[in-house]
Amino acid sequence: MSVSAGLEEITRRIEAATALDFAGNRLRALGRLALKHDSTRDLLSGRPIGHPLHPALVMVPAGAFLSATALDLTGGTTMRPASRRLIGLGLLTAVPTALAGWADWLDTEDAESRTGVVHAAMNVTALYAYYRSWRARHRGKRGLGSALLGATALGAGGWLGGHLSFGEGVGVDTTAFQAGPTDWREIAADTDITDDLRQVDVDGLQLLLTRVDGTIVAIADRCTHRGGPLSEGSREGDCVACPWHGSSFSLRSGAVLRGPASRPQPAYEVRVEAGRVQVRRPEPRSLRRNPVGA
Ligand code: FES
């Protein structure tokens, strides 16, 4: 069996391991209690920076820990104080990083949830091992064994984190591969669109159409967070709240006004010609040339 096939088999087994659901359900209940405030979830999800926060933060503790281990292995005794300080930095910055990851994981289910449980277990193991190494250094010891264990666990956790993002799509904008008509396309009669939230199918792509102050607006119906149907959500003035996890989007621009979503909804240009509603969306991104749902 090749290395990649072996790794794929490991992820497949983790994804199917329903025994992990017991731990996952308890972690989720605890997380919903600890991160129950919308403002906390909003911040940890990365909405203010327009992308998930966890992958951006993770480079700090991971970089600090691995740099410390590299100094341990190659730097000699003069580098030991620097190595200890780097481990201290990693321990401090691991806390907000873990909280951001926990917030992202709360809205996952099934295979993604199980992968997240093992990812977290590996990272907690790494954290504990580096903590032991840091304590040992304060007692005048080298602490290299614990650091090497930490680096190994960190590598396994990072690999599973990569699988969560690139294999399972957690944190990915769910509309990234959705296209839409690049030329004006007639999709409804002007009189069909009211202030209600209306789902309209355009070549297999679902759009949400409604009126804001009498003007017809159109955004993607599929929520960028985890794919919830916004047309089944609730209207909040000029915004729509997702029925799945409550993210709020501007109906005019698609901007995220409240997380856990961090990416805006694609907004479509709309015009009315001879009583018919037309939409289009210029598509500069190459992956949309063979779009999902077309
Ligand atoms: S799917 Fe999570 S907020 Fe819409």
Image: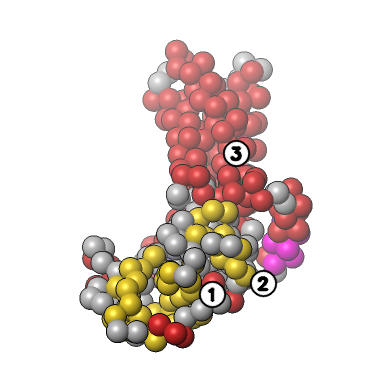
From which residue to which does the magenta span run?
21-27
Decide which of 105, 114 is in the foreground and name it.
105
Q: Is residue 3 visible?
A: yes
Residues at marks 1 and 3 touching, judged by CB atoms closer than 8 Å: no
Is 252 included in the stretch rendered in magenta?
no
Identify the residue shown where x is 57% and y is 54%: 259
Decide which of 277, 27 is in the foreground and name it.
277
The amino acid on which the numbered mark 1 sits, given as a three-letter code, is Asp
Identify the residue shown where x is 61% and y is 63%: 236
Residue 20 vertical position relative to residue 197 in the rendered view, above or below: above
Q: Which residue is mark 3?
A: 96
Q: Which residue is mark 2?
A: 18
The picture places residue 158, in percent across and down from the top left corner, at 48, 50
Q: Is residue 182 left or right of residue 253?
A: left
Mark 1 residue element: loop
The amino acid on which the numbered mark 2 sits, given as a three-letter code, is Thr
